[in-house]
Amino acid sequence: MYLAIIGGTGLSQIEGIEDVRHQMVSTPFGEPSGPVTIGRLQGCDVVFLPRHGYNHRIPPHQVNYRANIWALREMGVDRILAVAAVGGIHPDMGPGSLVVPDQLIDYTWGRPSTFYEGDLDSVTHVDFTYPYDETLRRAFLEAGQALDLELIDGGTYGATQGPRLETAAEIRRLQRDGCDVVGMTGMPEAVLAREAGIDYASLNVVANWAAGVRDGEVISLAEIDRTLNRSMGKVRKVLKHVLNDENRMLWRRTG
Ligand code: HPA
């Protein structure tokens, strides 16, 4: 059992990881977003990888999602907790909210989004009815409860191409489709994890109201930064709590 955290915008580092080492992992799909950070957090072995690189230089459409997931699997990771900034569409999911989505719709295009291509013995499909792992979703939600932080249980994540933000009409379309939040990195990350046999769940941090949700307003990038900075403290607490629980379970299993 080996757990990885993939950090998104606003979470390029995790303080408090002990016995840290960094390792570059090369993959048949090229380089991951950076060397992985390996260490212990809350007594739990953990691997950390910032999706956009340690300097936040890789835009959503150019993240090498395949290399990232492949590298984690190479290291023996079998569970991923992802963190991702999103825009809020649902009226209950305003800036500062934390959402643990249970569904997604993929609007991205042109991203290498499968390991199953090239010289295959046979065509391979994976089941993706429920894209997020329920046990990991529960781990996030229970951490929220224990910490008295509100985490919204469920919602549909719309994955857009970026790097530009959406138009108001695009968000209206996503809303009609049933999306509650919108982000640029949830896919193909989630499906590649599924293909690799890695359990995956995502903690979405609402950074702004999605385009046009607040009539006549445009999106302020400075406001996004401020909201994310304010919210990341909560995200770090949630992650630490999940790992703490994880650690206790491990002791129970081995003790
Ligand atoms: N749209 C897409 N991705 C995002 C947004 C948004 O409004 N905010 C943060 N990531």
Image (spheres, rainbow, N blue to C red):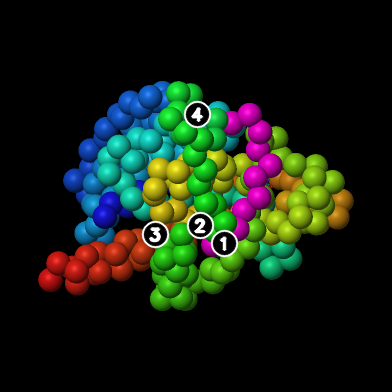
What residue do we see at 64% from left, 58% from top? Answer: 156
Q: Split into 4 quadrants, where in the image is the N terminus?
A: bottom left
Q: Name the mark nearer the viewer: 3 or 1.
A: 1
Give the spatial CA distance, label 1 vs label 2.
Answer: 6 Å
Q: Earlier in the sequence, mark 3 or mark 1?
A: 1
Contact, mark 3 vs mark 1 (Cβ under 8 Å): no
Contact, mark 1 vs mark 2 (Cβ under 8 Å): yes
Give the spatial CA distance, label 3 vs label 1.
Answer: 18 Å
Give the spatial CA distance, label 2 vs label 4.
Answer: 23 Å
Span highlighted in magenta in the image: 99-111
157 over 237 or under it: above or below: above
**Mark 1 lies on residue:** 102
Q: Name the mark nearer the viewer: 4 or 3.
A: 4
What residue do we see at 41% from left, 39% from top? Answer: 69
Mark 2 residue crowding within 10 angstroms, few (<14) / some (14–19) / many (20+):
many
**Mark 3 lies on residue:** 239
Give the spatial CA distance, label 3 vs label 2.
Answer: 17 Å
Image x and y of residue 195, in percent: 45, 43
79 over 120 or under it: above or below: below
Q: Amino acid at mark 2?
A: Tyr
Question: What is the residue that sits farthest to the right in this orientation?
Answer: 216
Q: Is mark 3 within 8 Å of ligand 1?
A: no
Q: Amino acid at mark 4?
A: Glu
**Mark 2 lies on residue:** 132
Q: Name the mark nearer the viewer: 2 or 4.
A: 4
What residue do we see at 36% from left, 64% from top? Answer: 242
Q: Amino acid at mark 1?
A: Asp
The reply to whether the magenta stretch includes residue 26 is no
Image x and y of residue 165, in percent: 71, 40
**Mark 4 lies on residue:** 117
166 relative position to 215: left or right: left
Which element type, helix, strand or loop, lies under badge 4? loop
